[in-house]
Amino acid sequence: MPFPETSLATIDTPAVLVDLDIARSNIARFQAYADAHGIAVRPHIKTHKLPAIAEMQLDAGAIGITCQKVSEAEAMIAGSDAIRDVLITYNILGGEKLEHLKALAKKVKLRVVADNRTVVDGLSAAFAGEVAPLSVLVECNTGANRCGVATPEEADALAAVIDAAPGLVFGGLMTYPPAGGEAGVERFMGAAKDLIEARGIAVPMITSGGTPSMMHAAEAPVTTEYRPGTYVYNDRSLVSRGVCGWEDCALTVLATVVSVPAPDRAIIDAGSKTLTSDLLGLSGYGHVLGRDDIAIDQLSEEHGRLVSTGPIGLKVGDKLRIVPNHACVVTNMVDTLKITGAGHDGIETWPVAARGRIV
Amino acid sequence: MPFPETSLATIDTPAVLVDLDIARSNIARFQAYADAHGIAVRPHIKTHKLPAIAEMQLDAGAIGITCQKVSEAEAMIAGSDAIRDVLITYNILGGEKLEHLKALAKKVKLRVVADNRTVVDGLSAAFAGEVAPLSVLVECNTGANRCGVATPEEADALAAVIDAAPGLVFGGLMTYPPAGGEAGVERFMGAAKDLIEARGIAVPMITSGGTPSMMHAAEAPVTTEYRPGTYVYNDRSLVSRGVCGWEDCALTVLATVVSVPAPDRAIIDAGSKTLTSDLLGLSGYGHVLGRDDIAIDQLSEEHGRLVSTGPIGLKVGDKLRIVPNHACVVTNMVDTLKITGAGHDGIETWPVAARGRIV
């Protein structure tokens, strides 16, 4: 792995490492695919939470960024003048959030989503007195069964409500699809687009996204824009789905063996406060690079338990690098990252600008 | 619940709420049990991470605090002059951590643990030149199969190593027991104590801990000290074990319904970045107070999915209070808490002083 092994001894553990060369390569790979298929790229920053990596994505050709929460968007915009176009893929409710949203809309090209009338009414009330209208997309449920209107007919009806609402302009259609859900996206979004256009309302964009099936985005040609997040770092869940290899994982957790209490068991100083309890359908809590025989079978907050099918072959003080199950949640656990690559001389420490931005 | 419902509308969500009156009652309940049985109380601060709550525990009769990591201890000590006695229940390794440990030892009465020779050697090398020796306890595995020496004989041997090591003094025995493991604690610790005392080495303290079986601590009479953590807030895992009721849960997550996309499904604005993915053997990710029919069956980072056996009966904008599966990990997700009770007039915002302290 490109991360300089000689420097790892100097890093206090546990620590989250990011190799910018791998991240840059991951960014380029999807951008090339999207460019080849005429799809705009709007990366979700939930994975990295770093203005500097958003700038790498924009430099590579991304048209803007995606955030999940208003406070995430604030942190990202505060950290980079290059971020001028932001989509917040969330139903935004409540006076405090709406005030922040109005301030954001004065700074960047801003779009949000809605899947219900209550949210639209709140947005309209907030923006009716503003100079520029807010662009609102309709979130559509194409099979993930999280948020989203249930049918193209409902999407059409809500688009008409947005179009008629003071202070708002209809911005298009958005979905967070299930993996492999391209046919469902095409069917739903195509039907909704036809209905809305038949009213005489334009559908400026249709945005979908999610790393697992990003290399199939073009199989839903109705999609104009794609929003991958995890692709920048990759993780064990994506390796297990065959989306990438271990060598494509830009984010790893550096841990130290603190105890070897049995011949087949070792304990590391990274637990759920670093690796998190996210399983994403997997067994175990991460992959120890170079040790396919080891499973991380149990985490408590500050301990990770490693078991092997044979002798564990580790000693107290050994350092290990672990690819976590889910990269996005790991960057939310730490105040800083250790960064290498991309022309950086040695290892730098970067604060995670948008960590913990949940409102 | 004592949290003032009328004030909840003013809190931006998701938010983590703590009711200090319930916390105080939880603290008093275990302190009374421990006092009645002559057991010293040394609460683990991993649950609250707050100097002010540590002070409540000390005021109630606790003899000191427990931390898991050196940086946690630093944050707690920096936040309260009342914290003068700290046990760090962790194998501490590496030059940077040992330097911090030496600085801490000059400020408070400090104890650490070790379960292997490498850790003891590192501690000895660091403290050999210090004026005062460091107290080191031997961590024993009484069935949790995490860290700890495996047998009383190994505990005895490591105690002798510590006793002979420059800069160190043997401090006693420590275990993190499995729930219901009192008989095992008594057997292991009793045997180890006999062996060590037969060498002419005193065993100043024997410390055990863990909230699930805290009200059975006296069933291992060899124990001189107990280290509960979660008991201060309680959580869904403890309710499910019969340790407490919902009315004893001091920490709740306040969330807003942002979407009701189907008659039996609603989405809240608290996901794994607030509730975490910790299951602790349970099904679902938390308990919605007052709604036994609802399961939180799926989390993504910023969405929680609620499903009901019947009509969900919620509307967009409704606020819900949720008891998380595991309180300790929730306080690590947020920079601030909303505090009420204990004479506080209204709702205060407190920073989580030791959040994210993983090194």
Image (cartoon, coloured by chain):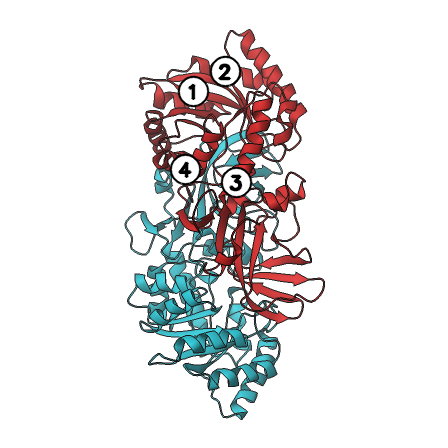
Chain colours: A red, B cyan
Distance from disc 4 to disc 2, alpha carbons, whole Å, reads 27 Å
Q: Which of the marked residues, 1 or 2, is nearer the chain's N terminus? A: 1
Q: Which of the marked residues, 4 or 2, is nearer the chain's N terminus? A: 4
Q: Is residue B135 left or right of residue A4?
A: left
Q: Name the residue under label 3.
A: A23
Nearer to us of marks 3 and 1 is 3
Distance from disc 3 to disc 1, alpha carbons, whole Å, reads 31 Å
Q: What element carries label 3?
A: helix
x%, y% of residue B46?
44, 60
Front-lying residue, A162 or A313: A313
Distance from disc 3 to disc 4, alpha carbons, whole Å, reads 14 Å
The relative height of residue B145 versus residue A227 in the rendered view (above or below) is below
Q: Do labels 4 and 2 share a chain?
A: yes
The subunit letter for the residue under badge 3 reads A
Q: Do labels 1 and 2 share a chain?
A: yes
The relative height of residue B345 versus residue A188 in the rendered view (above or below) is below
Q: Which of the marked residues, 3 or 1, is nearer the chain's N terminus? A: 3
The subunit letter for the residue under badge 4 reads A
Q: What element carries label 2?
A: loop
Q: Do the residues labelled 1 and 2 touch (CB within 8 Å)?
A: yes
Q: Is mark 4 on a helix, strand or loop?
A: helix
Q: Do labels 3 and 2 share a chain?
A: yes
